[in-house]
Amino acid sequence: MASLEVRRSPPRSRRQLEVRSPRRDKYSVLLPTYNERENLPLIVWLLVKSFSESGINYEIIIIDDGSPDGTRDVAEQLEKIYGSDRILLKPREKKLGLGTAYIHGMKHATGNYVIIMDADLSHHPKFIPEFIRKQKEGNFDIVSGTRYKGNGGVYGWDLKRKIIRLYRKEVLEKLMEKCVSKGYVFQMEMIVRARQLNYTIGEVPISFVDRVYGESKLGGNEIVSFLKGLLTLFATT
Amino acid sequence: MTKLAQWLWGLAILGSTWAALTTGALGLELPLSCQEVLWPLPAYLLVSAGCYALATVGYRVATFHDCEDAARELQSQIQEARADLARRGLRF
């Protein structure tokens, strides 16, 4: 007589352990926008592609500061296409600055990691899985993109300070409390404060491709204010 | 202490040491060869620092990677994105 193999379901206690798997990591991308009607659909498409291909749980928070070119309308269309669980719209009435945009966006972020980047295609989302891998590898609090190491580089010479970084959510919240600079300078201040608080920082080589569409919001006087900001940091930290 | 304060402290200490030694304020009689080196030392250090800075910047600029492939890849992905989004109903 052939023996009957009966598949018994695993004992109840083991089933409970399997169901209670570790909380999945979720990555919130903060995208402050101002007049990015052309670039916004492209950056969102590339983000969705990178995240989906790597099976990463994500959300994209678009913080538009009352752009006159209809960026908000495009954002609403993207929300319809990809779903309001993936695309969150948190707009503001007028241009209130980068720092406050991040604070505003973070209040609604449900991820345990936050990614800060520009909406103008200067950084390609294909690097984000690299950032995530690097963060896990070294258990870093912050992972920053660099154009100067490894096979990082640029296409199109520029002086602009573009930043793409991954933060643990609680680290970013803590740093935002401490930073006082305005504008793009505060990105530098974040790293200075992070070093002071002994947070660990990792780096990933990235490539920067010069603007494809749209006007840059950085002019000659940004260089001056960058230097002023640098000196202020030197004198106050 | 801020970075600025640290630098000022460091410069003050080194500066006063140099001044004390070169003016003989401490009553030390250094051999002539030492004095000859010590006296222009700050100027030499300043010029060397400037040369080092220039050389570093020059080297970094010369060896900076140019990413032509990244630019090409981005362009083709933009085409792909626009087509896919139009299919999904996005009105550009």
Image (cartoon, grey):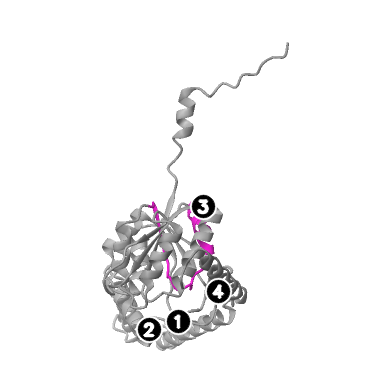
The image quadrant where one finds the C terminus of chain A is: bottom left
Q: Which residue is denoted by mark 1 in the rendering?
A: A159
Q: Chain of mark 1?
A: A
Mark 1 or mark 4: name the one nearer the start of the chain: 4
Which one is earlier in the sequence, the residue at label 2 or at label 3?
A: 3
In the image as oriented, which residue stretches furthest toward the right?
A1
Q: Position of residue A198 (x, y in %)?
A: 36, 57
Of the pair A126 and A94, the residue shown nearer to us: A94
User: Mark 4 falls within which chain?
Assistant: A
Cβ–Cβ under 8 Å for marks 2 and 4: no
Residue B5: quarter of image? bottom left
Q: Are both tags, 2 and 4, on one chain?
A: yes
What is the x, y in percent for residue B91? 46, 71
Q: Which mark is residue A223?
A: 2
Q: According to the image, label 3 marks what residue?
A: A137
Mark 2 — on which chain does it sit?
A
Q: Amino acid at mark 3?
A: Glu
Magenta-highlighted residues: A111-138
> Mark 1–mark 4 contact, CB under 8 Å?
no
Q: Which residue is mark 4?
A: A153
